[in-house]
Image: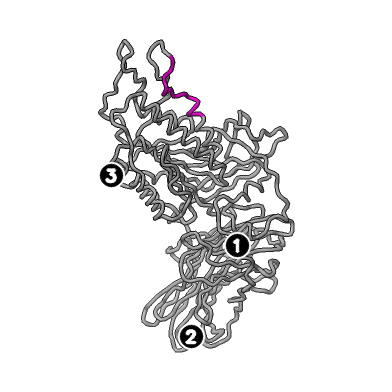
Amino acid sequence: MLTARRSSLALVIGLSVAAAGPAVRAISPRSQIASERAAGPTVDFIALDAGGAPVADLQAAEVEVRIADRVRAIRSLRRVVSGTTADASRLPAPYGTNDDVASGRLFLLVIDQESFDSGREQLVRNAVEGLLAQITPADRVMVAALPFGGVITSYTADVARIRLAVGRVAGQAARGESGSDLACRTRRFLESVDGLLRSRGTPPVPQTLILFTAGLAAPRRDATPGKLPGMCELQVDLFRQVAAAANMARANLYVMQPADIGIGAALPRPTPGGIGDLGSDNPLEGIEHLAGVTRGTRLALDAAGTGSLLRVAKESAMYYVAELEPMKDEAFGRSRPLGVRVSRRGVTTRTRPEVTFTDRARPPSSRLAVTDLLASTDAIADLPLRVGGFTVRDPDGKLRVGVLVEPADPSVALVSAGAILIDGSGQVVTHWHARDASERPLIGAMTAPAGGYRIRAAAIDAAGRPGAAEADIEAGLTPVGALSLGSLLLSVTRGGATALALEFGSEPTARASFDIYGGTEQTRLAATLEIARATDGPALAAVPLALTRPDASRVVATGTVPLGALPPGDYIVRGIIRLEDGTTGRVVRTLRKVAK
């Protein structure tokens, strides 16, 4: 029965509705914070398991980076989550960290419009439609039709604009294309790709370059025997220039081609007298050459569906950044051969064939502000942070998203901190700035309507180190009949005080609590707290929940988690409410216990 006793847990809400700080800038994928902060040169690469899925737990000791035949010492290895890599068999993350900042992906879609016959553009549209179903709100897509159409839409997260841009591309393939025509067309396309990549500069994160083409010529002289090269000579250097431009643009290349290229086609050959000298007319040879020189991947366009780019979406969902120990004789501004190898069996790596380091001096810490860190999309890990979110309801009925920020090292003193709430379209909905970042626990609150959001929290410590961490949250209450439940919160008692926490260690117990809204003192219900290894797995322990009413608008359900009996690891904590008529509801949260 809901009672009217006073709550013993006054931590909801010591939500400090600290004064909102200055409005943050719009999020931009071109933020230069991460690259400017780098203390050593960095190399990014993709690691895939035998099934083609990103590998999420590589350690620096397993990675070898070789630049110009010299193995480089790795100072740190950071994983960047840039897409959806959720594993349904795993528990939800207990909190967000610097390692899990979703930087978002940059997809550059380039269509070789002169290679496609009119009417075959649907192959490209189908493939892009499948990709659009896989992108996240943090992703950005650019569409270009080359060599004549140019950039149709610059980087955007607007799915309707992307779909419209691709739909505007029309095939312009010439009928009766000769070998010289093929070479000329290939040269025009490669030159325009080279120009596009160089004009965009170097982005702060790797980008995925997807070229759609129905055939390219291989390098050729375009000449009859004994004569000088013709006007459509196609040199190897042009392919190398595209590879160099892709390297500078941090572009990982995929070449998408119709699956039926060359099937059943009779390729003409020159006569002994040199008449009809078409060179190599196999339209696959140029594609293979381009993929080889760029370390790109060649994939087939699916004529029957939208699955052609699913592999691209999967492989681009995560990458690693290896920070290298700086060297006195470091070569800046010059491309050098790059190789990345992983010692773990069954793991393959993807990286560009060359790397170019840029000498960037680290700016004074005074130049960085929390608003700068929040406006960036980069992973900023100088200051390791943890961030968690939860939902509560104000007495006036408004929802509030709470955010808990804590440094991974509890001895670190924070001097400034804040957070923003990003909605599903990538827009900043609201923000919070801490009045006193030294408070423990450091809790903020932001009013927002129900829905899915991403919290980005940032802080700077007394040494000037910046950090930013992100966490997903579904803002809203859980309905149970006429009642509704707020988020389940975990806290711990240290030094005689109970405070919210994101990570637990040697403490004998933790406290779990959540708010119940609605109902009256006559409402009968049963409340239980369970601890399990899986979200729907059997309970390892179950304890009753105490119900207290701190005010007229809510009741707090509180229970004890027996931490001391649990080995280190992740556990699911379930708060279960069962009404008299049998209606049942629950709220859950992942608890992480670490060895200390």
Q: CA distance from mark 1 to mark 3?
A: 45 Å
Where is mark 3, residue-wise? 304
Residue closest to the eye, 131 or 524? 131
Q: Quadrant of residue 437?
A: bottom right
The boundaries of the magenta stretch are 228-240
Residue 50, position as x, y percentages in the image: 44, 40
Residue 432, position as x, y percentages in the image: 60, 68
Residue sitting at 36 percent across and 27 percent down? Answer: 182
User: In the drawing, does residue 235 fall left or right of residue 506?
Assistant: left
Whether label 3 touches label 2, CB < 8 Å = no
Q: Quadrant of the C terminus?
A: bottom right
Residue sitting at 37 percent across and 36 percent down? Answer: 213
Which element carries disc 1, helix, strand or loop? Answer: loop
Residue closest to the eye, 336 or 223? 223
Where is mark 2, residue-wise? 2
Residue closest to the eye, 412 or 176? 176
Which element carries disc 2, helix, strand or loop? Answer: loop
Which element carries disc 3, helix, strand or loop? Answer: loop
Q: CA distance from mark 3 to mark 2?
A: 59 Å
